[in-house]
Amino acid sequence: MSEQSAGNSGQGGGRIFYGWVIVGVAGTLGFLGTGFYAYSRGVFLPSLAEDLAEGSRFAIAMGFSAAAVTGAIIAPFLGHLLDRHSPRRVMLFGVLVVSASYLGLAATQTLWQYYLVVGLGMGVGMACMGGLAWHRSVISWFDHWRGRAIALAVMGASLAGIMMPPLVTSLVASVGWRGGFVTFAVITLAGLLPLIYFLMKDRPEDIGEVRDGHAYVNAHPEERVDIAEDSRVWTWQEMLRTPALWAIALIFGSMGCVYSAVMLHLFGHLLDIGIDASQAALLLSATALFAALGKPVVGWMSDQFGARVTIWLALVVQCLALLLFASADRYLPALLAACLYGFGYSGMSPLRTFAVSTALGSASFAAATGVLRIVELPLVISASPLAGLIYDATGSYRIAFLVLAGLMALACVGPLFIRAGGARERRQRASAG
């Protein structure tokens, strides 16, 4: 499809709006990018700990926290770049760095080399090719359909979560953890570089389109509501004085650090309570399956009812799941916990983007997200090492899961300080106008 025909596709009714192609590219980025990084590291953890850290899972977890620190440090500058320039170019750079980092991990011989590759290489690479970049692109293409578009885009990572744990478990068993990282490097480079280069478009106006597509906008003129906040350009000082930013940081910083800790340590916890490796991998896949099933529900709820109710639902369900993980001692309770947790965190990524773009608008979305990364940093870097430290001290993760459940309960305060957004608020604004 040429750029001109893509630009006209929303006007004619027979062709797909190009924004859905952007969603497809974003979903693939989540599948081969975030999915590899997030859903597979727990499978690698025991091997990395034994070979590089004398069995210390805390030491390995610190590498991922270092990557989070690196990503947070560059996020405000990266956000400014994404809002004003080309997210596509940033993503291409990120793919190259992540692919090189996987090769570096495969060659790592010492703990300090591991920290360097993960903390610096993966920290920079995942920040550039991760959610910040492609979320920026998706919200540029959608307004009325934003919640559902974001939810569909992030399904790629959930689908990876369904497939990766058993596949990576088998891969590591066959070729070792070093061979696994080489495989990741090849697939990331060959799968993502041409896709982004040929199909990613930064903004609708680049190909003569508008948000949601000409066809939809022309057919639904009543839904075109001018929301001044959406086009406001914020300074970082103004953002830091806004209660909504701190509320979003509490909510999604808590969700993010819990997610990071669970994805890193759950596999080991399941082995510790007597579940074998193949069943543990299936339980990880179950969390991702229910995350994938939950994303369309979360997207629809965001558009219809707004952020507050949907976020509360996500937090409460995650809290219940973590309590179940803490008490489970056999497969079936662990399976129930995995399904609940997957559904609960299905909204983490789409709701974060929805809440930020609702509270602080689209014009400064990436810059606001970058500032949030700094504000959230103390939470994000603490959970995974803390869980590892508790395990090293007690030989169990049960206390860690109780602490994480308490954090989810605390985060329930956050939605009180953010706008609802969604169709309901849009209709209220239209009637008031």
Image (spheres, rainbow, N blue to C red):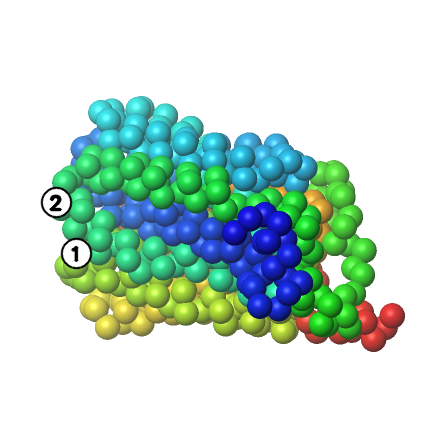
Residue 430 to residue 275: above or below: below
Choose the circle earlier in sequence order: 2 or 1: 2
Q: Quadrant of the C terminus?
A: bottom right
> At x 64% / y 57%, what residue is drawn?
8
Residue 291 to residue 375: above or below: below
> At x 12% / y 45%, what residue is drawn?
174
Residue 277 numbered mark, or none = 1
193 or 306: which is nearer to us? 193
Location of residue 163 (image quadrant): bottom left
157 or 207: which is nearer to us? 207
Q: CA distance from mark 2 to mark 1?
A: 14 Å
Q: Which residue is mark 2?
A: 174
> At x 62% / y 68%, what residue is drawn?
13
109 or 125: which is nearer to us? 125
**Disc 2 + disc 1, Cβ < 8 Å:** no
The answer to whether residue 415 of the structure is visible from this angle is no
SS class, disc 1? helix
The answer to whether residue 17 of the structure is visible from this angle is yes
> At x 39% / y 59%, what residue is drawn?
158
Of the residues tagged 2 and 1, which is closer to the observer?
2
Residue 140 numbered mark, or none = none
Which residue, as the protein is rendered here, is positioned at the far right?
Answer: 433
Location of residue 107 (image quadrant): top left
The 10 Å Cα crowd at callout 2, few under 14, some 14 to 19, many 20 or more, is few
Rendering coords of residue 71 (x, y %)? 50, 36
Q: Amino acid at mark 2?
A: Ser
Q: Amino acid at mark 1?
A: Ala
Indicate left or right for 215 with 404 as reference: right
